[in-house]
Amino acid sequence: MPGSNTTDMAEEIVVRGGTVVDETGERRADVVVRDGRIVAVEESIEVPSGATVLDAGGCFVSPGLVDLHAHLREPGGEIAETVESGSRAGALGGYTALVAMPNTEPSIDSASAARDVLALGEKALAEIAVAGAITIGRRGERLAPMGELADLGVRLFTDDGNGVQNGGLMRRALEYAFGLGVVLAEHCEDKQLAAGGHMNEGAWSSRLGIAGESALAEEMMLARDLALVRLTGAPMHFLHLSTAGSVEMVRAAKAEGLPVTAEVTPHHLALSDAVVQGYDPAFKVKPPLRGPADVASVRSGLALGVIDAIATDHAPHAPERKEEPFDEAPAGMLGLETALAVAHGALCLEPGESAADDAERGWVPPRAGAAVSVGELLGWFSWKPARIAGLDQESNGAMGSRGGQGGPVRPGAKAHLCVFDPSATWVVDPARQASRSRNTPYAGRRLTGKVRHTVFSGEVVVLDGEAQR
Amino acid sequence: MSIDELVEVRRAPAVRHLLSINDLGRDGILEIMRLADAFAEVSERPIPKVPALRGRTVATVFMEPSTRTRLSFETAAKRLSADTMTFTAASSSTVKGESLRDTVETIDAMGIDAMVIRHHSSGAPLRVTDWIGASVINAGDGTHEHPTQALLDSYTILETLRARQGGAEPHDLSGLRIAIVGDIKHSRVARSDVLAFAALGAEVVLVAPPTLMPASIEGWPVQATGDLDAILGELDVIYLLRIQAERLGEVLLPSLDEYHWRYGLTRARAAALKKDALIMHPGPMIRGVEISPDVADLPASLVTRQVRNGVLVRMAVLFHLLGSGEI
C-alpha cells in the first residue's frame, strides 16, 4: 500500500467492506484516506494500526453528493437555517458540496455578499458554493455584477424563487453571461400564468378549492428560454422541472444540440398533488407537486438522460410559518437529509404492498420493473451535478482549495465520500432533523436507504448516521 | 317526529367534526333533515328552546366577516341552551399578528365543546382539528366548502316539495334537475351543494362561463354547460350564486352587465322556467347582476325561507355532533 511506511502522524481512515461506485463503474473495494485525500482503493486492505475504520458492509461507497439547489437562508433567514445547520443537514444526507441559492436577505447580488457566504462556508460540514443572482435584488430589472462574482468562482446565476419575467432582459443576461463563461439557471414560472396559484391546477385544486397554478406557467417560460438559448448560444440550466411538457421540451432541445441541463427534485419524483388533500402546508412548494403522469415523466426523463441531476431545493421555513393556512404559508420543503432515500424509494425499488394505498394519498409508488441501479442514482446526485456546478475540477484560488467533487474514487482524489446503505430503513422524525426548521414533507414516513457515513475533505463528518460536529 | 322521540333515534355521532358534506354522506344528511324537522316543531313553541345542550359551550370564530351566518349559528346554539362565545377577526388579536393556531388553542383552553369556524383560507378548519379537542364545524372555508349552507338548501327544497305534495313525503331529491349558476370556481356553496344534492339523488348541472368553472370537474357528480338558456325549461331548481366584482379585475368577466346579459335570471328567463321551478340564492343577493330586481320577489323565491331554515339545520348539526341524547 503506498505510503504504509510513512512516519508522519496523519490519521488514516479506512472505509471497509463496501462497493465502490463512481462514474467508472462498481467494484468491491476498501478506500484509504489520509491528509484529505484518497490514498488507496483496493479490494482488500490491511488496516494500519491507529486507523479509523468506517464499516461499509452492505453499503455503496460513492463520491460525496453535490446539491445544485440548497436554500441555506443566511444571511437574513437565520431563524430558519444557517450555512452551518444547513451543511450539517447536508452532511447527514451524504452531501459534501452545496450550492447556496442567492435568495437571501440581502440577495447574493454583489461580490461582498458572496464573499460573506463563502466565508461562513469555511467552517461548514460541506463545501459551500454560491449561486449569484442574475439581477439586483432578484427584481428582474438590472443585471447583477456577474463578472465580479465570476472572478470569485461563482459559476451559476439564478433569481431562483422568481423566474426572470422580462424576456428582453433575459436575452441580454444570457449574452452577457456567455461572455463570462458562466451558466444561468432559471426558476421557470411565468407570474401572469401562475396567477397566484398555491398548488398544481387540476382535479385536486378544483376539489379542494385552492387556487391552481397551471403547468403552463413553467412550460411557457421554459419554451421562451429554450428559444433564447437557440438565439444566443449561451448554456442554461433549468431548475426543478416538474411537468411532462417540460421534459418533452428539454428532450427536443437536447436532441437539437442546445447546451442545456436540467434538474428535478426528490419530491417531484415521489409525490403527487393528491398529498395536498389534508391541506398541510408541508406539501406546499414551487413548482407545485404535479399529477402522477408528470411524476412518471420526470422519472423517465432522468432515466433517458433528459434530466441530468437530482437537486433538493431544500427550503427551510420556521415552524410557525408552516402553521399558517395553506394559501398563506410559504412554499418550500426540507430536502437535504432525506433526498437520497426518497429518490432511492421512487426510482430503485419495486412497488411494495402499500403501493395502491400510497398512490391514493399522493405517494407515487415506484413503477414495477423500472428500477434503476443505485450506481445510476448516485450519478444524478454526485458526478453529474458536480460537473454542472463546476465543482468537479479542483481549484486553488482566492477562496482556498475547492472542488474535486463528484469523483472518481481513486488515489490522489480529494476525499469526499458518501457511504450509503440501500437496505437500511428509518422513519423521518422532524424533531431529529439537523435543519433549524421542521418542514419535511416526509414526517413519520418510513424510508428505505440511509447515509451511514460522510467524509468531507478527509474528515469524518457523519459516522453511523450521527453528525460529528 | 317530536323532540321527545329524539332520544330513541339518537345514535353515537359518526363524526366529531363537520368539515365537508362528505363527512356526513347520504345517511348523515338525512339524519340532519330529520332532526331539523323536529326542531321546526320546537321553533313553533311559545318558548322556542330546548335544554339539549345545556352546559355545553359553542364558540363562533369568524376570521372573515359574515354576520348572517354567525347569528344563525349563535341563535341555533342558544335555542339548544348552549352557552356561546364569539370571536371575530376585526376585534381580535389576529390583527396584532397572532397565528390561527394560537388563537384557536387559546379559545379551546377556555373549555368549549364546539368551534364554528369561518375562514378565508380553504382547509383552515381541517387544520384546526389537529390543534384543538373540540368539535369543529366549518362555517365556510375559502373557496372550499360551506356544508351547513348545503344542508339548509337541501332542507329547504325537501320542505317545499313536501308542502306541495300535501303529506306524501319525498324521501330525497331523486328525479330533480338542479342547476347551479354562477361563479362555481370560487364558490364554497357550490362545492357543498354539489355533494349534498348528488348524495340525495338529484341531477346537478353547473352553469357558468368557462372562466368561472373549476379547472377540472373530474370526479364531480355533475354535468356542466355554458348555455343557461338551453336548459332553463328542464330545471326543477335554479340556484344562483353571487358574482363578486373582484372577478372583473382578475379578467374572468368583461363586466357585470355582460354577466347579467348571459347568465342573469331576468324576467324573460324566469318565464322560460317550469311553472313550479324553485329559485334559490345563498345571499346576499346582488339585484341586477345574478338576478333581476323584479324576479327576486316572485312567490317562487325561497330566499327568506332559506334563512329561517338555516337556524333549524344548524341546531340539527350542533345536536348531531354534541347531543348526548338527554333532552
Image (cartoon, rainbow, N blue to C red):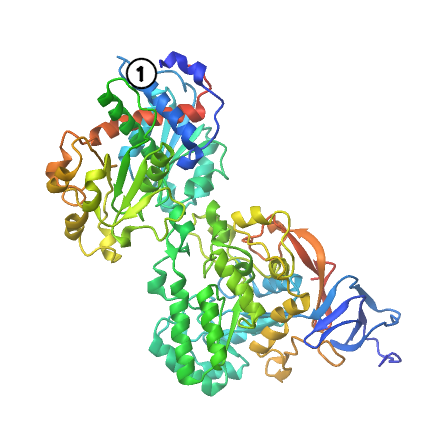
Q: Residue at x 49, y 73 (%)?
A: A251
Q: Nearer the viewer, residue A264 or A364?
A: A364
Residue A261 percent across, percent down from the top left: 51, 75
- Quarter of the rendering containing residue A467: bottom right
CA neighbours of label 1 inside 10 A, class few (<14), some (14 to 19), many (20+): some
Q: Residue at x 84, y 69 (%)?
A: A51
B180 shown above or below A154:
above
Q: Residue at x 73, y 69 (%)?
A: A459
Q: Residue at x 44, y 71 (%)?
A: A159
- Look at label 1 and name its amino acid: Val
Residue B33 percent across, percent down from the top left: 35, 25
Q: Decide if residue A411 is in sight here.
A: yes
- A447 sits to left or right of A131: right
- B5 sits to left or right of A39: left
Report the label total.
Answer: 1
| Circle 1 chain | B
- Quarter of the rendering containing residue B47: top left
**Residue behind mark 1:** B42
Residue B300 percent across, percent down from the top left: 17, 30
Quadrant where the image shows the C terminus of chain B: top left
Q: Secondary structure at mark 1?
A: helix
Quadrant where the image shows the N terminus of chain B: top left
- B32 sits to left or right of A354: left
Q: Decide if residue A71 is in sight here.
A: no
Residue A417 percent across, percent down from the top left: 71, 70
